[in-house]
Image (cartoon, rainbow, N blue to C red):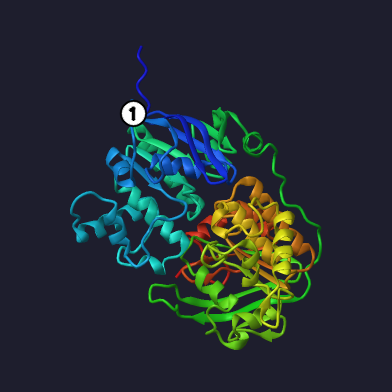
Amino acid sequence: MIEAPARLQLEGISKRYPGVLANDRVSLRVAPGEIHGLIGENGAGKSTLMKIVYGAARPDSGEIRWNGERVQIASPAQARRLGIGMVFQHFSLFDTLTVSENVALALPGHTDRTRLAIDIRAMGDRYGLPVDPEQHVYSLSVGERQRVEIIRCLLQQPSLLIMDEPTSVLTPQAVEKLFATLHRLSEEGVAILYISHKLEEVRTLCSRATVMRGGRVTGDCDPRAETVASLSRMMIGAEPPRATGTTRTAGDELLVVEGLDMPPLEPTGKTLRTISLSVRQGEIVGIAGVSGNGQNELLALISGEDPRAPTNSIRIGATGIGALPVTARRKLGLAFVPEERLGRGAVPAMGLDLNTLLTNDSGLTRHGLISTAATTRLAQNIIERFAVKAAGTAAPAKSLSGGNLQKFTVGREIVKDPRVFVVSQPTWGVDVGAASQIRQGIVALRDAGTAVLVVSEELEELFEICDALYVIANGRLSERIPVREATVERIGELMGGTRNTGDTLAAA
């Protein structure tokens, strides 16, 4: 019996950039109807390989076969014409265009905008990915932008669907619904190449998995026959430890938000309604929620990017900070890590040494002059302490993989030993080894007496490191829930706005 040709077959793909061999003779085969996992640590070469498949990069050597025929994919447009659709982890959207306009760019021929808006809403409702077709992308949160990527790709009706970390914006219930959809697509003959750092997802969803490390394929397996620990060992050579800390009694309240009502700065933003929370010295408090439910607005008010809050509605210790500028809050001991690594967390073209100046100039400048020796020492300390893979302290931030840049930006704030540490999506898109290092650093900060507030859509992460949780939905915050009393089902229902808790509504 003659075996049917693979939907996608890569043979000996190599790609070199200055100073790095990103892909080294990589071979991969994905059959029609197969859900194939691609796993590896940050910097393993997965993203480069997917850029080659999608026509965004050209291989130096090797060949690509599509349905058995050798092809050269010169552009994403050609990839889409072949039937390849991709959901990017790092988005390919135009900020100044609306959702509908961004989706229309990926569709062939003339598009009826009224019909397209209806299709976008219907697709969002079907898969639990609500989005407003007329909203401009610049006003969307990171999670909402990812929803646009997923919807745009599904509307193309691809025969190969590449998904790069697609579930970070979904509730557990919505993840189940997405997986059911992917299984239906595979039954219809669609090949799916699924890239994720969530190894339990790969075990649940995929029938085959390819493991990459250092630009090479180092393994091929049936992930259903593996454990998370064994998959982790294939990826990073070890099983990542869970974050551990000391048991201690929390101290005084260091961060307090009380009765905060605030309309959004952007007309498409989320109104915050009677938000109250507290974080004590030596504890980690988490906020769970689907992206776009008010997290960004709340964090902007806490960090000082939005200084409109009444003075005493946000406090560090006994000091009201609601109207203080960012610098004044930092002097009171507040450190903040935004969800966006490049552009907000770091300046892409600047070296790591100069990026240390963004949030910490203590001892780094004198009489208005930068001490290059001091910035270099600080950057080197962060690189060594948090195992950041970089080409040196002067390496541009944009040259680092997502996980290594995240370790650097989180580490830059941790080394300041802040009184209050606020971090958004600390391990979004980060491999299991890097995620473990980041979480352990956060727990160690807690054990040293810092009050830590973590906003994350990774429930497993929140359950691992937090002492208590809140859930945000539609601009409202649930009551405080001790982690020992929380369940994934309960938190997931609150994230979806389907339950109330205490006297505070989880949804309008």
Residue at the location (41% across, 76% down)?
A: 266
User: What residue does disc 1 label?
Assistant: 70
Q: Taking 80 as reference, is 196 left or right?
A: right
Q: Is 88 placed left or right of 286 in the picture?
A: left
Q: Nearer the viewer, residue 261 or 39?
A: 39
In the rendered image, is residue 497 in sight? no
**Percent of width and height locating residue 363:** 74, 75
Q: Amino acid at mark 1?
A: Arg
Give residue 491's position: percent from left, percent from top: 56, 57
Picture quarter with the C terminus: bottom left
**Which corner quadrant holds the N terminus?**
top left
Secondary element at image label 1: strand
Seen at 62% across and 35% down, the residue is 231
Q: Could you tell me how many numbered marks the image carries?
A: 1
Note whether 385 is above or below 480 in the view shown: above
> Compared with residue 476, is residue 36 higher up or lower down, i.e. above or below?
above
Left or right: residue 168 compared with residue 316: left
Left or right? Give the position of 131 relative to 215.
Answer: left
Q: Position of residue 429 (x, y in %)?
A: 55, 51
Label 1 neighbour load within 10 Å: few <14, some 14-19, many 20+: few
Report if residue 445 is visible in the image: yes
**For the point 56% across and 38% down, which residue is it?**
215
Q: In the figure, residue 443 lies in which quadrant?
A: bottom right
Query: Going 51% across and 66% down the picture, which residue do you hit?
Result: 343
